[in-house]
Image (cartoon, rainbow, N blue to C red):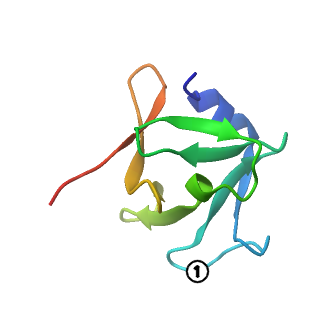
Amino acid sequence: MALRLWWLMGFICVVYSRQDRRLFSKTPLGFLRCRTGVTLAMYPDRAVNGTRDNRGKFASLQVSFIGINRINVVFFGLLSKMYLCMSNTGALYGKTFGI
């Protein structure tokens, strides 16, 4: 089942690094975890799911901020090589963008 926007908005609190420290660099690497302990994972088959494995290899994300006031956030799966996208219905999926 695809994750929904309300799940992300209601439960994700902060991006953590692999050493469980908050990241404030320009392109932080880490993972997204909710208060209930579920970690967002992006798989190579475009699936985006929650996993209980805190150190899963598909849970590693790169977070970038873009835009004039840096209000847009881009999530990139390091192993899946896909960006996190959302459909019109609020379902999350992974997508590659070719150059």
Structural crowding at the residue carrying mark 1, measured as other residues with C-alpha within 10 Å and reported as few (<14), some (14–19) or many (≥20): few
Residue 20: quarter of image: bottom right
Is 83 on the left-hand or right-hand side of 8? left
The amino acid sitting under disc 1 is Ser
Residue 13: give x, y in percent of width and height: 75, 51
Please tell me how many numbered marks the rendered image carries.
1
Q: Nearer the viewer, residue 43 or 97?
A: 43
Is 49 on the left-hand or right-hand side of 46? right
Residue 58: give x, y in percent of width and height: 56, 53
In the picture as drawn, the residue positioned furthest to the right comes out as 36
Residue drawn where x is 44% and y is 19% of the image: 89
- Callout 1 secondary element: loop
Residue 26: give x, y in percent of width and height: 51, 78
In the picture as drawn, the residue positioned furthest to the left comes out as 99
Residue drawn where x is 59% and y is 35% of the image: 49
**Residue 43 vertical placement versus 10 (above, below):** below
Residue drawn where x is 43% and y is 35% of the image: 93
Residue 62: give x, y in percent of width and height: 51, 65
Residue drawn where x is 58% and y is 21% of the image: 1
Is 68 on the left-hand or right-hand side of 75? left
Quadrant location, the C terminus = bottom left
**Residue 80 vertical placement versus 26 (above, below):** above
Q: Nearer the viewer, residue 5 or 84?
A: 84
**Residue 52 vertical placement versus 66 (above, below):** above
Q: Which residue is mark 1?
A: 25
